[in-house]
Image (cartoon, helix red, strand yellow):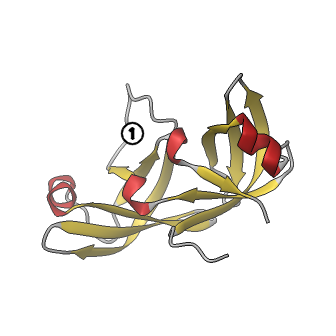
Amino acid sequence: MTLSIRNQLPGTVTEVRRGEVMATVEVRLTGGQNLTAAITMEAVEQLGLAPGTPVHALVKSTEVSVATGPVDGLSIRNRLRGTVTHLVLGAVMAVLKVSMEGGELTAVITKDAAGDLGLFVGSEVVALVKSTEVALSTA
Protein backbone atom coordinates (compact mmCIF):
# COMPACT_ATOMS: atom_id res chain seq x y z
CA MET A 1 0.00 0.00 0.00
CA THR A 2 1.28 3.46 -0.88
CA LEU A 3 0.17 6.39 1.26
CA SER A 4 0.12 10.13 0.69
CA ILE A 5 1.15 10.68 4.32
CA ARG A 6 4.70 12.01 4.14
CA ASN A 7 5.66 11.26 7.73
CA GLN A 8 6.12 7.52 8.20
CA LEU A 9 8.48 7.10 11.14
CA PRO A 10 9.72 3.59 12.02
CA GLY A 11 9.85 2.50 15.63
CA THR A 12 9.01 -0.14 18.21
CA VAL A 13 6.14 -0.23 20.70
CA THR A 14 7.44 0.09 24.26
CA GLU A 15 4.15 0.29 26.16
CA VAL A 16 0.40 0.01 25.61
CA ARG A 17 -1.85 1.68 28.20
CA ARG A 18 -5.36 0.35 27.72
CA GLY A 19 -8.56 2.22 28.46
CA GLU A 20 -12.18 1.29 27.89
CA VAL A 21 -12.37 2.77 24.39
CA MET A 22 -8.94 4.22 23.63
CA ALA A 23 -5.35 3.32 24.38
CA THR A 24 -2.12 5.25 24.39
CA VAL A 25 0.75 3.51 22.69
CA GLU A 26 4.32 4.54 23.41
CA VAL A 27 6.70 4.12 20.49
CA ARG A 28 10.48 4.39 20.56
CA LEU A 29 11.45 5.81 17.17
CA THR A 30 14.48 4.40 15.36
CA GLY A 31 16.46 7.54 16.23
CA GLY A 32 15.74 7.18 19.95
CA GLN A 33 13.01 9.78 20.49
CA ASN A 34 9.68 8.74 21.98
CA LEU A 35 6.26 9.24 20.41
CA THR A 36 2.78 8.67 21.84
CA ALA A 37 -0.20 7.60 19.74
CA ALA A 38 -3.77 7.66 21.06
CA ILE A 39 -5.73 5.05 19.11
CA THR A 40 -8.85 2.95 19.62
CA MET A 41 -8.74 -0.31 21.53
CA GLU A 42 -10.15 -1.95 18.41
CA ALA A 43 -7.06 -0.79 16.48
CA VAL A 44 -4.75 -2.07 19.24
CA GLU A 45 -6.35 -5.50 18.98
CA GLN A 46 -6.47 -5.57 15.15
CA LEU A 47 -2.80 -4.59 14.90
CA GLY A 48 -1.77 -6.95 17.71
CA LEU A 49 0.17 -4.18 19.46
CA ALA A 50 2.35 -5.11 22.43
CA PRO A 51 5.81 -4.12 23.62
CA GLY A 52 8.33 -5.11 20.98
CA THR A 53 5.95 -4.77 18.01
CA PRO A 54 7.62 -2.94 15.09
CA VAL A 55 5.41 -0.12 13.78
CA HIS A 56 5.41 2.97 11.62
CA ALA A 57 4.01 6.15 13.14
CA LEU A 58 2.04 8.05 10.49
CA VAL A 59 1.45 11.80 10.76
CA LYS A 60 0.04 14.09 8.09
CA SER A 61 2.37 17.03 7.46
CA THR A 62 -0.48 19.47 8.11
CA GLU A 63 -0.77 18.09 11.66
CA VAL A 64 2.79 19.04 12.61
CA SER A 65 3.34 22.35 14.43
CA VAL A 66 6.76 23.88 14.99
CA ALA A 67 8.35 25.75 17.89
CA THR A 68 11.78 27.34 17.99
CA GLY A 69 12.46 26.38 21.60
CA PRO A 70 11.19 24.39 24.56
CA VAL A 71 7.45 24.75 25.09
CA ASP A 72 5.85 24.52 28.53
CA GLY A 73 2.19 24.44 29.49
CA LEU A 74 0.91 22.49 26.47
CA SER A 75 -1.08 19.27 26.39
CA ILE A 76 0.74 18.16 23.23
CA ARG A 77 2.65 14.99 24.17
CA ASN A 78 4.93 14.63 21.18
CA ARG A 79 7.83 17.06 21.03
CA LEU A 80 10.47 15.94 18.57
CA ARG A 81 13.73 17.90 18.37
CA GLY A 82 15.42 18.44 15.05
CA THR A 83 16.96 20.81 12.53
CA VAL A 84 15.30 22.42 9.51
CA THR A 85 17.02 21.00 6.43
CA HIS A 86 14.65 22.26 3.74
CA LEU A 87 12.31 25.27 3.61
CA VAL A 88 10.05 26.39 0.77
CA LEU A 89 7.99 29.53 1.20
CA GLY A 90 4.92 29.73 -1.02
CA ALA A 91 2.49 32.60 -1.39
CA VAL A 92 0.47 31.45 1.63
CA MET A 93 1.99 28.25 3.03
CA ALA A 94 5.47 26.97 3.84
CA VAL A 95 6.83 23.43 3.73
CA LEU A 96 9.76 22.48 5.88
CA LYS A 97 11.66 19.28 6.49
CA VAL A 98 13.02 18.61 9.95
CA SER A 99 15.93 16.20 10.26
CA MET A 100 15.86 14.15 13.47
CA GLU A 101 17.95 11.27 14.76
CA GLY A 102 16.76 8.33 12.68
CA GLY A 103 14.53 10.17 10.24
CA GLU A 104 12.90 13.21 8.79
CA LEU A 105 9.60 14.94 9.46
CA THR A 106 7.73 17.22 7.05
CA ALA A 107 5.59 20.10 8.35
CA VAL A 108 3.25 22.39 6.43
CA ILE A 109 2.62 25.70 8.22
CA THR A 110 1.55 29.15 7.12
CA LYS A 111 4.12 31.40 5.48
CA ASP A 112 3.31 34.01 8.16
CA ALA A 113 4.12 31.53 10.94
CA ALA A 114 7.43 30.62 9.29
CA GLY A 115 8.26 34.33 9.08
CA ASP A 116 7.19 35.06 12.65
CA LEU A 117 9.39 32.19 13.88
CA GLY A 118 12.31 33.39 11.76
CA LEU A 119 12.79 29.92 10.31
CA PHE A 120 15.73 29.19 8.02
CA VAL A 121 17.64 26.11 6.90
CA GLY A 122 19.67 25.21 9.97
CA SER A 123 17.10 26.39 12.55
CA GLU A 124 16.84 24.17 15.62
CA VAL A 125 13.15 23.39 16.17
CA VAL A 126 10.75 21.24 18.13
CA ALA A 127 8.08 19.50 16.04
CA LEU A 128 4.81 19.21 17.97
CA VAL A 129 2.20 16.54 17.24
CA LYS A 130 -0.92 15.72 19.26
CA SER A 131 -1.08 12.03 20.17
CA THR A 132 -4.57 11.81 18.65
CA GLU A 133 -3.07 12.77 15.26
CA VAL A 134 -0.66 9.82 15.19
CA ALA A 135 -1.79 6.66 13.38
CA LEU A 136 0.12 3.39 13.60
CA SER A 137 0.73 0.71 11.00
CA THR A 138 2.39 -2.67 11.19
CA ALA A 139 4.28 -4.42 8.41
Q: Nearer the viewer, residue 97 or 51?
A: 51
Task: Name which residue lies at 77% across and 60% down.
Answer: 138
* Residue that lies at the very extreme toward the top in this rendered image: 20
Give the SS element for disc 1. Answer: loop
Q: Is residue 114 above or below residue 22?
A: below
Residue 119 shows in this picture: yes
Quadrant of residue 106 within the rendered picture = bottom left
- Residue 56: percent from the left, percent from the top? 68, 60
Q: Nearer the viewer, residue 67 or 52?
A: 52
Task: Name which residue lies at 62% across and 41% down.
Answer: 36
* Mark 1 neighbour density, 10 Å: few (under 14) some (14–19) many (20 or more): few
Quadrant of the frame with the C terminus: bottom right
Residue 64 shows in this picture: no
Q: Is residue 12 above or below residue 85?
A: above
Q: Is residue 78 above or below residue 96?
A: above
Q: Which residue in the structure is indicated by mark 1? A: 70
Q: Is residue 35 above or below residue 30?
A: above
Amino acid type of disc 1? Pro
- Residue 9: percent from the left, percent from the top? 62, 62
How many labels were placed on the picture? 1
- Residue 7: percent from the left, percent from the top? 53, 65
Quadrant of the frame with the N terminus: bottom right
